[in-house]
Image (cartoon, rainbow, N blue to C red):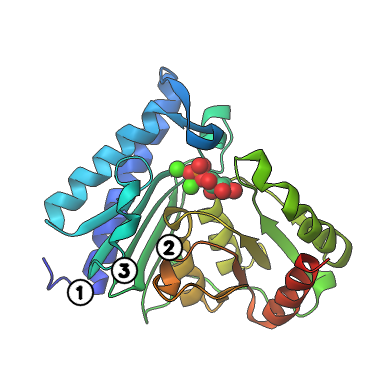
Amino acid sequence: MSDYTLAARLERAISIAEEAGQMIIKAREQQDFAKRLKKDNELVTDVDVAVDELIRQRLEEHFPGEARLSEELAPESALQVEAPRLWVVDPIDGTVNFAQGLRHVAVSIGWMEAGVAKVGVVHAPFLGETFSAAEGAGAFCNGQPIKPSNAGSLAHTLVGTGFPYRKEGRKHLLKRLEAVLIECQDIRRNGAAALDLCDVACGRLDAYYESVSPWDFVAGWVIAREAGARVGHLYEAPQSVPEDLYPEHLLVTAPGIYDAMAYLLLDADQR
Ligand code: IPD
Ligand code: CA
Ligand code: CA
């Protein structure tokens, strides 16, 4: 199906994400899923795996043979960045929220061609919101166009971020956190990176920074960029990894605040 237009891919990805969202809602209602810890103390439930399998099947039906990178079933193929076409899937972004009964939970499906992220869908079943974007066609929430805020000073910048599961990975982030709490309006930790990116895209948050995994950010990155937010990395991606797949040191902001946020965070790293 290499002749699919971006609009057709987006439409299909939206319907797959919404079907996955129904599965997540049902699983919460039934409450009979098991939980366990995987590497680095990360929580995973049966539902994460079942939703990943549903999305795998649907993508294979509609886009047979296209490569997939997904958190539960195909994380190792992060190495397949050479793939000319690549689906990047987080079946449940916000697993801890899902298991705790919180509402910040999303299905995230991105699509890349030749290393460039071109299609993104982030569907939040408990919030009733579907964010979507395709390259060159703008970004939407439930079909309505979205845009970032016009924040122009750190004092008026509400910042989203997150922290890795590994406790050892947290300590060095405290300097950034201190700088943000002192210089910016305030901070939010909502527990689903994909939604943090969409919240910047639609102006609910003014900035977001974090180091994550590819499936956490690719879809939201397209949505934020298409909405008019500025997306970038605090430190350059290695030459071997396409920028749109490099998950470290992300910075995504309303356009008027990017440089000030980058300076603040990089300066904090030097302390
Ligand atoms: C996590 C969420 C969280 C972020 C973590 C991610 P998961 O994804 O996006 O907001 O801070 O780094 O791992 O495990 O819920 O899919
Ligand atoms: Ca995730
Ligand atoms: Ca996940």
**From this viewpoint, which residue is outermost toward the right?**
182
Dot 1 falls on a residue whose secondary structure is: loop
**From this viewpoint, which residue is outermost toward the top?**
32
Pick the quarter of the image with the C terminus: bottom right
Q: Is residue 244 left or right of residue 166?
A: left
Q: Residue at x 78, y 56 (%)?
A: 177
Dot 2 falls on a residue whose secondary structure is: helix
Q: CA distance from mark 2 to mark 1?
A: 19 Å
Q: CA distance from mark 2 to mark 3?
A: 9 Å
Q: Are marks 3 and 1 in contact (CB under 8 Å)?
A: no
Q: Which amino acid type is marked by label 3?
A: Met
Q: Which mark is residue 112?
A: 3
Front residue of this view, candidates 154 and 69: 69
Task: Choose the circle earlier in sequence order: 3 or 1.
Answer: 1
Q: Is residue 172 left or right of residue 238?
A: right
From this view, report whether residue 205 is shown above or below residue 102: below
Q: Which residue position is annotated with label 2?
A: 218
* Residue 93 can be seen, yes or no: no
Q: Are marks 2 and 3 in contact (CB under 8 Å)?
A: yes
Task: Choose the circle earlier in sequence order: 2 or 3.
Answer: 3
Q: Residue at x 23, y 45 (%)?
A: 56
| Residue 6 percent coordinates (x, y) | 25, 73
Q: In the picture, residue 103 is in which quadrant?
A: top right
Task: Choose the circle earlier in sequence order: 2 or 1.
Answer: 1
Q: Which residue position is annotated with label 1?
A: 5
Q: Which amino acid type is marked by label 1?
A: Thr
